């Protein structure tokens, strides 16, 4: 294929990429590529590149490949061919047009979901290779506009939605006041030193889904939890800088998050229902800073809710009676193995559970993950088209009777919502928190 | 911190407040705050009209509330000078109230209440009609900005600084953003230079200068002092600090994949660490300590570029040097338990949580607050006191180091206790 074919095929008009390319020179490209390859990659990348035998078994692991009628261009191996293999082969001497195509492939045609790694006979992690490509693009200033803007927001506010410090606290007070109409004297305790739980959320919650904070507060209250939320930056556990390749900023964000919790002397961090944020706190951000594991105990909302039911800290009025199916988010299932815990919660809360197929670690990505949905409107049509295989999976679950899809991840909600709408699937999306709140028995 | 010589240092245990009547009186009561000298205790409560007010101990075991009540109160804090301040809101107008005296200036929101070390000055960040500013002791900046973060107060309290958006930049204007729209405003006036990002402004000890971390593009991080960057850029930097003894500025910097400490742009700790942050000076300014990872996953404390041999796998925080700089201590987490390390050795006991250790002024003793099985204890030189508290403040040494002030609540009764630690425990 020619070097810029992917961009021209999909007629993408992304100013972040187009203007970024205009500012490149061959010398700059070569310098940045070799700097990244020499100082930031090592045995891992070399092993992956040298070990791959181009067998193509990864292809069937990729929902892009499956959704595009097995077009070889979308095979994970082909995506590496269009990006790092050529870069390494040419020792960084590639054109701006090559970088343009590579950016589109790395940022918008791979969700970093790691499903292909399970299908590779050697377990090669293509997501890592794509992340190296993104890192190069970041350093070249060739990043899709919308996700770059989100990364800029992180750098100024330490949250991804440009939420100002006062807006954050004001939102928490608003949700606390609303919840007090339902539960007298309910609190969202700010900056409570020595709390057992530090509850952190992602930027879109206060911006667009503040009711999720309300619901979490009601659940925490019903469980008698000794919990807190911080009033200052560090509250947002999300991290689009991890996905743009701005690792210096990723480190700054994760430092702020862990230190916000550590300064309050809390026992553990409970994260809301988000997948990529979990990846950033549990895997990438912590390790980039020098911690093998998170310095404080970090658990995802699935682990927290499961614990509430196991320890009988909350009671339900009756089980949710509409038939549900469950979407297993990549970052907390392939990334953390929380699939059986998810099913424990479903069984504790729902009458009728219909598995989607495939499921657990074999589940298909929502096509939003890896920052792809954050690349915004210029790539939306391509993204939703690539959701064809996911749509078929949802249709199959619906045919078995499922009416509600539980997806314990924000990005998955965004991606599945678009797929459900585009393909006319007519299913309702819910978080675990929505279900638990709906059936929760409030203490006297 | 303010001088504690004037506090009551007579040994003995004194009941300051019985909180049981507070709980009986108020259906809503937040966590109590205790003053630095331990003579006062207060909490945010709702009165019978369901308005927020402050309850504190009165004479003869009774309690009193502020005369004023509000739609909302938060961020209740005692300043270092033992005055009580909070952020208050009435009819959606926010301000600060200190000892029940509200400031005259009001805002659409106020937050980040900050005291100078003596407690003479209180500053907050403010927002009014979507313009952001800073106010100190009810005296506001003349300028306001479209965005403001990271407010800092000078040691003497007479100056404030903050990161401000000097050129309003809209969401999605990524190329305008890259040109630099942020700076530091000192007392409301911005530096003449803009940067892509600015973080963590900090004042010099003479209150005259401000340093901050900046980046001018995605790859070049600098330390800027009064708007002028160091001559060298780095892959990344952390918060700078001014030396207490000269005009130099130091900061952790990353270059060639390793972290170093740089002074005015030149590397002065050349060992090279996997991580290095939260450096600080001894009181006399002659020693520098920092939290470091000597290797991936191996955390310890380094003094003057000499790391302790002992390392901890999970976390290291709350590092402190004795006044003379000869001793060092910190809190660590290892094997999922918290502990305290002093001079390169860990205390034997481990805890469910540990707070920042404090050295006696002569540097001979170390004390801290720790949590064991849900109760709080005082620990001195590794010996855990038996008394278990439901709430405890970190202990305070008298200026001669012979006595320890313990402020703790047991079964809703708040006691102020002075014990002698002279000649051992």
Image (cartoon, coloured by chain):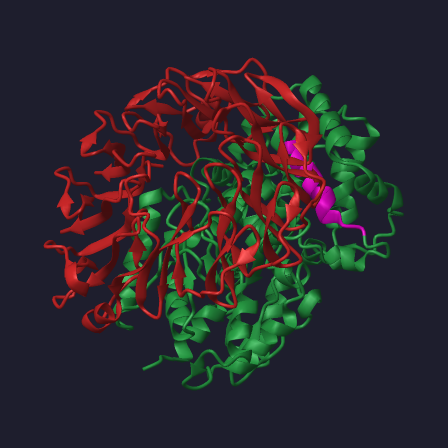
Q: Position of residue B287 (x, y in %)?
A: 56, 26
Is B362 left, or right, of B156 in this rendering?
A: right
Front residue (pair B348, A441): B348
Front residue (pair A52, B182): B182
Q: Residue furthest left?
A: B67
Q: Which chain is red?
A: B
Q: Which chain is green?
A: A
Is A13 left, or right, of A328 in this rendering?
A: left
Front residue (pair A431, B53): B53
Q: Is residue B411 visible?
A: yes
| Quadrant, the C terminus of chain A | bottom left
Q: Is residue A368 visible?
A: no
Is A315 left, or right, of B96 in this rendering?
A: right
Above/below status of A384 relative to B326: below
Residue at the spot 42% in from the left edge and 28% down from the top edge: B201
Residue at the spot 28% in from the left edge and 73% down from the top edge: A182
| Quadrant, the N terminus of chain A | top right
Residue at the spot 68% in from the left edge and 31% down from the top edge: B306
Q: Quadrant of residue B79?
A: top left
Q: Is residue A132 magenta?
A: yes
Please, what is the dominant secondary structure of the magenta stretch? helix
Q: Which stretch did the figure color magenta?
A: A124-137
């Amino acid at each position: 294929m020619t070097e810029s074919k992917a961009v021209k095929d999909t007629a993408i008009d992304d100013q972040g990429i187009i203007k970024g390319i205009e500012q490149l020179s061959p010398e700059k490209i070569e310098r940045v590529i070799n700097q990244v390859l020499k100082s930031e990659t090592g045995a891992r990348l070399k092993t992956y590149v040298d070990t791959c035998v181009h067998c193509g078994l990864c292809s069937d692991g990729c929902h892009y490949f499956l959704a595009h009628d097995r077009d070889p261009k979308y095979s994970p191996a082909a995506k590496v061919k269009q990006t790092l293999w050529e870069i390494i082969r040419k020792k960084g001497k590639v054109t701006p047009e090559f970088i343009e195509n590579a950016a589109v492939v790395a940022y918008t045609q791979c969700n970093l979901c790691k499903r292909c790694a399970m299908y590779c006979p050697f377990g090669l992690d293509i997501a890592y290779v794509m992340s190296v490509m993104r890192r190069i693009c970041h350093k070249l200033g060739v990043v899709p506009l919308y996700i770059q803007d989100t990364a800029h927001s992180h750098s100024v506010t330490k949250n991804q939605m440009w939420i100002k410090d006062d807006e954050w606290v004001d939102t928490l007070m608003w949700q606390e006041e609303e919840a007090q109409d339902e539960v007298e004297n309910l609190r969202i305790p700010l900056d409570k030193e020595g709390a057992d739980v530090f509850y952190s959320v992602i930027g879109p919650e206060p911006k667009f889904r503040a009711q999720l904070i309300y619901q979490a507060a009601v659940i925490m209250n019903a469980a008698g939890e000794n919990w807190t939320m911080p009033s200052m930056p560090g509250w947002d556990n999300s991290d689009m800088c991890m996905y743009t390749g701005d690792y210096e900023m990723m480190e700054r964000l994760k430092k702020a998050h862990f230190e916000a919790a550590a300064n309050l002397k809390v026992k553990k961090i409970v994260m809301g229902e988000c997948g990529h944020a979990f990846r950033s706190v549990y895997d990438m951000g912590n390790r980039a800073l020098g911690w093998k594991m998170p310095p404080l105990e970090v658990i995802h909302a699935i682990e927290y809710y499961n614990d509430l039911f196991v320890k009988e800290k909350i009671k339900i009025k009756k089980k949710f009676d509409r038939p549900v199916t469950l979407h297993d988010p990549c970052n907390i299932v392939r990334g953390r193995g929380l699939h059986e815990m998810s099913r424990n919660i479903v069984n504790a809360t729902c009458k009728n559970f219909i598995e989607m197929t495939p499921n657990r670690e074999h589940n298909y990505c929502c096509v939003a993950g890896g920052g792809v949905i954050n690349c915004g409107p210029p790539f939306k049509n391509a993204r939703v088209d690539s959701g064809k295989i996911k749509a078929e999976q949802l249709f199959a679950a619906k045919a078995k009777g499922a009416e509600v899809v539980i997806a314990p991840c924000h990005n998955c909600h965004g991606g599945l919502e678009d797929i459900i709408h585009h393909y006319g699937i007519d299913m309702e999306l819910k978080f675990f928190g929505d279900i638990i709140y709906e059936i929760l028995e409030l203490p006297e | 911190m303010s001088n504690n010589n004037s506090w009551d240092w007579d040994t003995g245990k004194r009941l300051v407040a019985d909180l049981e009547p507070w709980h009986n009186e108020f259906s809503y009561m937040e966590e109590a705050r205790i003053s630095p000298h331990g003579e006062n205790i207060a909490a945010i409560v709702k009165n019978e009209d369901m308005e927020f007010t402050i309850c504190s101990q009165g004479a003869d075991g009774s309690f009193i509330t502020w005369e004023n009540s509000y739609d909302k109160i938060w961020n209740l804090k005692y300043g270092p000078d033992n005055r009580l301040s909070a952020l208050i809101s009435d009819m959606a107008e926010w301000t600060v109230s200190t000892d029940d005296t509200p400031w005259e200036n009001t805002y659409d929101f106020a937050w980040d209440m900050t005291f100078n070390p003596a407690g003479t000055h209180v500053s907050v960040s403010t927002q009014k009609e979507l313009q952001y500013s800073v106010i100190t002791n009810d005296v506001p900046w003349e300028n306001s900005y479209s965005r403001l973060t990271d407010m800092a107060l000078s040691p003497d309290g007479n100056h404030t600084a903050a990161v401000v958006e000097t050129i309003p930049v809209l969401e999605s204007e990524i190329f305008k953003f890259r040109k630099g729209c942020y700076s530091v405003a000192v007392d409301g006036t911005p530096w003449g230079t803009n940067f892509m990002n600015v973080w963590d402004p900090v004042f010099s000890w003479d209150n005259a200068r401000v340093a901050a971390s900046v980046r001018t593009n995605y790859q070049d991080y600098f330390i800027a002092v009064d708007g002028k960057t160091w001559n060298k850029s780095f892959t990344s930097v952390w918060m700078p600090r001014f030396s207490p003894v000269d005009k130099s500025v130091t900061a952790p910097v990353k270059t060639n994949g390793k972290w170093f400490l740089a002074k005015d742009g030149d590397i002065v700790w050349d060992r090279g660490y996997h991580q290095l942050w939260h450096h600080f000076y001894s009181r006399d300014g002659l020693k520098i300590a920092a939290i470091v990872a000597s290797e991936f996953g191996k955390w310890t404390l380094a003094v003057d570029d000499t790391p302790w041999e002992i390392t901890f796998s999970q976390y290291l925080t709350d590092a402190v040097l004795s006044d003379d700089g000869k001793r060092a201590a910190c809190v660590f987490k290892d094997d999922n338990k918290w502990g305290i390390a002093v001079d390169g050795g860990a205390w034997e006991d481990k805890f469910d949580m540990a707070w920042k250790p404090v050295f006696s002024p002569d540097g001979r003793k170390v004390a801290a607050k720790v949590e064991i099985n849900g109760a709080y204890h005082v620990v001195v030189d590794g010996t855990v006191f038996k008394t278990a508290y439901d709430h405890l403040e970190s202990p305070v040494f008298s200026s001669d180091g012979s006595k320890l002030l313990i402020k703790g609540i047991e079964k809703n009764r708040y006691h102020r206790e002075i014990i002698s630690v002279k000649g051992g425990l």
